[in-house]
């Protein structure tokens, strides 16, 4: 077992292979569990975990406790105000990198979102409260039209989930009209995109520009919890 306890949000799927590994000479072993896995309510569930090969040989039984909680999540499995430990507990991606800064600390993962590869960054203030979630798109294209396609993918995904944005601006510089297409305009830094959704508890920003490299982000910022002020 990789951990004796697993924390899941109500409705999330439990996959024992995410938390246990097993090997033997036959290569036929499978990880199995005994116990109540009907996680349709909050509570703690004690499971027996073991491996069994094709001949019916079984390993030592170990226990894992699955804790199910109902959380009103703001983004992914996190709530604004969560501590780093709580965010890490419920985040489905593993291998997060924690970094401390002067005014904020971050917990980052490599993952995908809205059909693009991203660096997922949770930002915490000095009170260890989650105040923002950043998705930094990390796609690398030789054809700059693909960057525009990425932007449109994310824009569509956010609009489908949150509705019509409050702000949807396209900033065109002086040479934009001479560009053959949007890809060329992006490559020359002649266009930038800024979209914003205002929700009750957060503001969502979706931005892309080329400033010594294409920078494409979509960020969720709490209206209650704030970054620590730099004194």
Image: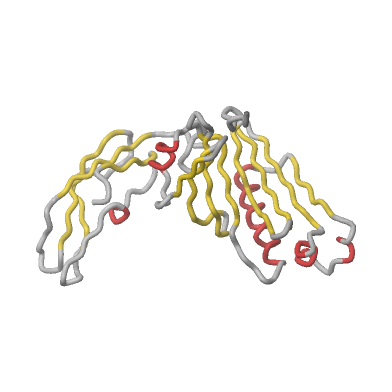
Q: How is the image coloured?
A: secondary structure
Q: Quadrant of residue 66?
A: top left
Residue at x 40%, y 37% (from the top left corner): 85
> Quarter holding the C terminus?
top right
The percent coordinates of residue 60 (x first, y second) are 11, 54
Left or right of residue 110: residue 44: left
The relative height of residue 107 versus residue 208 in the rendered view (above or below) is: above
The percent coordinates of residue 161 (x first, y second) are 60, 45
Q: Quadrant of residue 36?
A: top left
- Number of labelled discs? 0
Residue at x 78%, y 63% (from the top left corner): 182
The percent coordinates of residue 49 (x first, y second) are 19, 51
Left or right of residue 184: residue 68: left
Residue at x 59%, y 59% (from the top left corner): 138
Left or right of residue 132: residue 207: right
- As rendered, which of 153 and 143 lies closer to the eye? 143
The percent coordinates of residue 6 (x first, y second) are 31, 43
Left or right of residue 217: residue 133: left
Residue at x 22%, y 58% (from the top left corner): 31
- As rendered, which of 107 and 16 lies closer to the eye? 107
- As rendered, which of 199 and 124 lies closer to the eye? 124
């Amino acid at each position: 077992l990789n951990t004796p306890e697993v924390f899941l949000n109500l409705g999330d799927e439990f996959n024992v292979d995410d938390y246990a590994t097993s090997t033997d000479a036959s290569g036929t072993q499978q990880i199995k569990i005994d116990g109540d896995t009907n996680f349709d309510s909050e509570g703690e569930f004690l499971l027996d975990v073991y491996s069994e090969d094709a001949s019916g040989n079984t390993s030592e039984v170990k226990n894992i406790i699955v804790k199910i909680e109902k959380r009103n999540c703001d983004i992914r499995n996190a709530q604004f105000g969560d501590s780093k430990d709580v965010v890490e507990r419920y985040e489905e991606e593993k291998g997060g990198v924690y970094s401390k800064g002067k005014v904020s600390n971050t917990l980052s993962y490599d993952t995908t979102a809205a059909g693009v590869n991203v660096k997922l960054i949770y930002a915490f203030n000095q009170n260890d409260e989650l105040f923002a979630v950043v998705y930094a798109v990390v796609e690398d294209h030789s054809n700059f039209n693909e960057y525009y396609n990425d932007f449109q993918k994310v824009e569509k995904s956010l609009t489908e989930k949150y509705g019509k944005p409050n702000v949807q601006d396209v900033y065109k510089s002086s040479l934009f009209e001479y560009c053959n297409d949007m890809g060329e305009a992006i490559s020359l830094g002649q266009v930038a995109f800024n979209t914003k959704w205002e929700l009750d508890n957060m503001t969502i920003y979706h931005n892309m520009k080329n400033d010594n490299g294409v920078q494409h982000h979509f960020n969720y910022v709490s209206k209650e919890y704030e970054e620590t002020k730099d004194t």
